[in-house]
Structure formats: C-alpha cells, structure tokens
Image (spheres, rainbow, N blue to C red):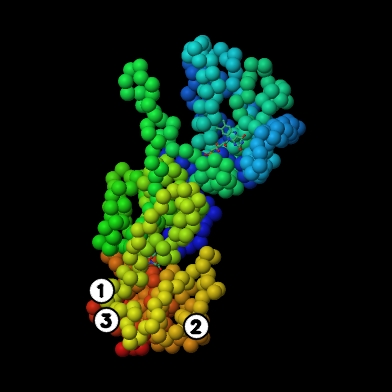
Amino acid sequence: MTDKPDDNTAPRPTTLEELVRWRRDVRRFRRDPVPDELVDKLLRLADLAPSVGNSQPWRIVSVKSPEARAAVTRNFEAARARSAETYDGAQADLYGRLKLAGFDAAPVHLAVFSDRAALQGHRLGRQTMPETLDHSCACMVTVLWLAAREAGLGLGWVSILDPTGIETTLGVPPDWKLVGYLLVGWPEEEHLDPELERHGWQQRTPFESRFSELTSAGGAPSSKPAPAVGSVALVGAGPGDPELLTVKALKALGSADAVLYDDLVAKPILALVRPGARMIDVGKRGYRKSCKQPDINAMMVTLAGEGLKVVRLKSGDPLIFGRAGEEIDACREAGIPLSVIPGITSAQGAAANLKVSLTNRDHARRLQFITAHDRNSRLPADIDWSAVADAAATTVIYMPKRTLSELAEIAMAHGLDPKTPAIAVANATRVDEQVIISTVGAMAADLGAAHPEGPVLVMIGEALRSANAAEIANAVVSTFGATELT
Ligand SMILES: Cc1cc2nc3c(=O)[nH]c(=O)nc-3n(C[C@H](O)[C@H](O)[C@H](O)COP(=O)(O)O)c2cc1C
Ligand SMILES: C[S@@+](CC[C@H](N)C(=O)[O-])C[C@H]1O[C@@H](n2cnc3c(N)ncnc32)[C@H](O)[C@@H]1O
C-alpha cells in the first residue's frame, strides 16, 4: 500500500497483456466529443483485421443523425424490456439495475454490419463455413476495441437490439446483417473487472474449463480435470531486509503463479519470486497512478478464479495498516481460499536496529501503533489523545510524514511532555536506513529538514531514551534533540 489516498484511475496499460486485461466493455461515457480524425484513424487500423479469404465483409455506418440515434435507443429499450421478462425474482431485479448501454452520453455511434453477399475473397473459406463472414466482423470489432482503449477511449458493444429494426432504421442493403452497435467515447471510470462481475451478474470462469487436449487420433477431446480453484495468500514482506522474511513467506514467493505487490515492498524481495510468475505492480507511484483498492480486490479474485496461486505481497505485516480487511472480504465473498502469512511490521524492524525495548518496564506500560493518515490524507479525527499523551506509553506512528507537526501539537496540548524522546526511522532495515533522533517538540522540524526519501515511521516515548546514537549508522541527532535527550 502507499500512504496516500485512493486515486480515481486505474493504471493505464503499457503492454499488450496489460491492455487486454484492462480493456473492458464501457457503458459510462463523458459527453465531450471525440475528434473525427481519431475515430478515422482507429477505424483504419481496425480495417487491417483478419477476414476469411481476405473478404473484409464489415460495413460500418457512423450514425450521426439525432433521429436515427433516438430510434436506435427506442429499439434497445424495447428489446431490453422483452429480455427482462425472461428473468424472475432477484435475477430480474438485478437485470433491471444493470447498465447495459450508454446511448445518451456516447459521442460516437457505429453500427457494424456483415455483408453476407460480399464478393471480395471469391467465397474462399466461406463455401464450407459461411458464418466465418460474421466471425471476421467480430475480429474487426476486437481490433477496434483494443485500439480505442489504447487511445484512452471506451467502447461498448450493444447487442440488446432487434437487428431487423436497426437495418430498417438505417436503411442498409438487404444483405447487410447487424453484427453490433458500438458506442465510443471517453470513459467516466476505469476498471480491471467486467461491469457484470462487479455488479454480481456473472463471474468469469477458469480458462481450463474451456480448454481440452486431443491426445490420440479418433479419441474424444478430453477436458482437463476441473482445476482446483486457485488461492490467495496475503503475505507480509517485512520492512525491507529480505532476511527478515518468514520461511513461509519465502516458500509462498517461490511457488507463486502471480504476485500483486505494493510499492513499499523492497526490490530484493521481489527478486525471490518464482521466475515465470506474473508480477503485477498495484501500487506504483510516479507517472502511473495507484490502483484503486476495488480493482486490486477484483484482480486478486479473478487471477485466483483462473486457478492461480496468487500472492498479495504487502510491506511489513499485512494485517497492520495494510487494508487487508477489504481484500479478505473480497476473497470470502468470491469463495477463494485465503491464507495470511504474517510479516515483521516496520515498527519491529526499526526498533531492532535501534536496539531499544519498546516496552521497557521502567518506562512503558503500553505499546500502541497509530496511523497519522486517514483515507483523505489528513490526521484522523478520532485519535485517542489521552492515550497518545500517556507518559507511560510507547507510540509508533505509521504514515507520519504529512501530519506530524499537527499530531505533536495536539498531543502536547493534551499533556505530552515536549521533551519526550522521538525517533524517526526511514527505510528501516534497508541499506538506506536513516535515523533521526529528536524530541516530540522538535521532531516535525527535524524530519522536515532531513526530508528522507522512502517510508518513515516515528516512535515516541520515554522507552526510547536508551537509543544510543553512536551505535546507529546514519543517525542524525538534532542539536536541539541531542541537548534535550542527553
Ligand atoms: C458480441 C457482444 C455483445 C455484447 N452486447 C452487450 C450489450 O448489449 N450490452 C452490454 O452492456 N454489454 C454487451 N457486451 C459486453 C459484455 O457484456 C462484456 O464484454 C462482458 O460482460 C465482459 O466484460 P468486459 O468486456 O468488460 O471484459 C457485449 C459483448 C460482446 C462481445
Ligand atoms: C500503509 S502502511 C503499511 C505498514 C505495513 N503493513 C507494516 O506493517 O509495516 C505504510 C507505512 O508503514 C511504514 N513503513 C513501512 N515500511 C517501512 C520501513 N521500511 N521503514 C519505515 N517505515 C516503514 C511507514 O510509516 C509507511 O508510511
């Protein structure tokens, strides 16, 4: 996880595999126009699609007339109402709520027909399998779909239509049969899972259930035995030093089929993953936006649904400030077997290198881990300030970077002595670990001045007074802090 709030956009694909996984049938469009030149460019690309005998049987009508659009929309609504009657009970309710097209908002409407009388290709291939003309049109649509998504556009394929009505409305030749009505525009949202999965209509099913092998001539194709459904393991990667992984975590990494990892997971740990496993960065910062949590849940469930052993790799311990609860719920709901492999949380890694007892019995009656960061990147409103101000407590503050000065001010206003030792540790247990020794009153300024790169936590409490700066590599002792501490 990153210590920043959810972004509204899933990562844009940079490889063909990512594009295919991310494509989606889009039904929620923004209304802004799509330049004609872009549509033209995409259609010309799609026109290069494969076709039986090189027949190129697709005929594409760009429907711009408002009257024709209104007639197509009415056609859809009538077809949808007829389909609704075929469902009962809860399924009928759900069908009624599904969004199955986006006629109103989509700026581009394309009707695609298959010309069953196409002369091009001299009927090659079609004499035995005439339906391959229509299949060729679907190939063209698929290329268009991917090209549109690659350009950032959404495409929705509408088939809940009476085709004869559309053919009449658009006045096409009698041999043109409707293949699909495509809506194209800028998507309002991005998702990694199909809308129909997200709304509980139907999950995708394992690849193996559609794949069989014929191993002897004349024998019937034997379906592979139904795969054991895959699994998800939430694995703690620890604070960074790979030697702090548990043996169980190491085994899970060594046998994973897919690893979904956060940006705080240290690179040397990723190197321990089984070669050949699919590596999916779900928390990358920088030019790509972070994945939204629902998309991570969906991806985990989908990959496990395909029969894969999925490792969800999180920094530190997965159950400590790691949004594991939402991922556990998603697996439970999808019936995916789930396990949790604990990791060393960053507080423990940091304390070990400082060689301080967080529960030193002369000073600490309580050890508490708090977050300084709510889902809106602000200091949580409901912190128990009397607990933070408790002189007999050791408090470890996760995600303190943005809000530390406010937190310290409020804690001091609740009675915490400004001279209480405070230690910030950046990149705990990693080669670039940095330690800042200061006091509650001065830490926010000292941390701001040191401005460390990478994850940081701050510990406060009398128990930390035994930290010995001389023993700690890369320790920065603030003049103010040093004076106060010694
Ligand atoms: C031939 C075809 C016809 C489709 N017709 C509709 C439709 O009428 N309405 C709709 O909402 N989605 C339609 N879809 C989209 C599918 O529902 C969607 O592709 C499927 O749920 C998988 O989701 P994904 O495309 O986001 O992976 C159609 C897709 C195909 C390939
Ligand atoms: C979303 S939380 C994840 C915590 C993680 N599950 C754990 O148990 O350590 C991220 C925060 O953990 C802390 N953190 C994680 N790794 C760290 C490290 N190596 N050094 C210092 N702090 C770290 C930082 O406060 C960071 O902002």
Left or right: 183 as drawn, with respect to 73: left
Question: Marks 2 and 1: CB-CB under 8 Å?
Answer: no
Residue 73, percent from left and from top: 71, 35
CA distance separating discs 2 and 1: 34 Å
Callout 3 amino acid: Asn
What mark, if any, has residue 468 been given in the picture?
Answer: 3
Quarter of the image where one finds residue 460: bottom left
Of the two numbered discs 2 and 3 on the same chain, state the one appearing first in sequence.
2
Q: Secondary structure at mark 3?
A: loop
Q: Using the image as rendered, state which of residue 395 and residue 108 is in the foreground.
A: 395
Q: Residues within 10 Å of mark 1 (few under 14, many from 20)?
A: few
Image point (65%, 37%), residue name: 87
Residue 9, percent from left and from top: 52, 51
Task: Identify the residue at the far front of this view.
Answer: 89
- Residue that numbered label 1 is attached to: 473
Q: Name above or below for residue 325 compared with residue 30.
A: below
- Residue that numbered label 2 is attached to: 386
Quarter of the image where one finds residue 359: bottom left
Question: Marks 2 and 3: CB-CB under 8 Å?
Answer: no
Q: Name above or below for residue 311 compared with residue 323.
A: above
Image point (37%, 34%), residue name: 225
Quarter of the image where one finds residue 184: top right
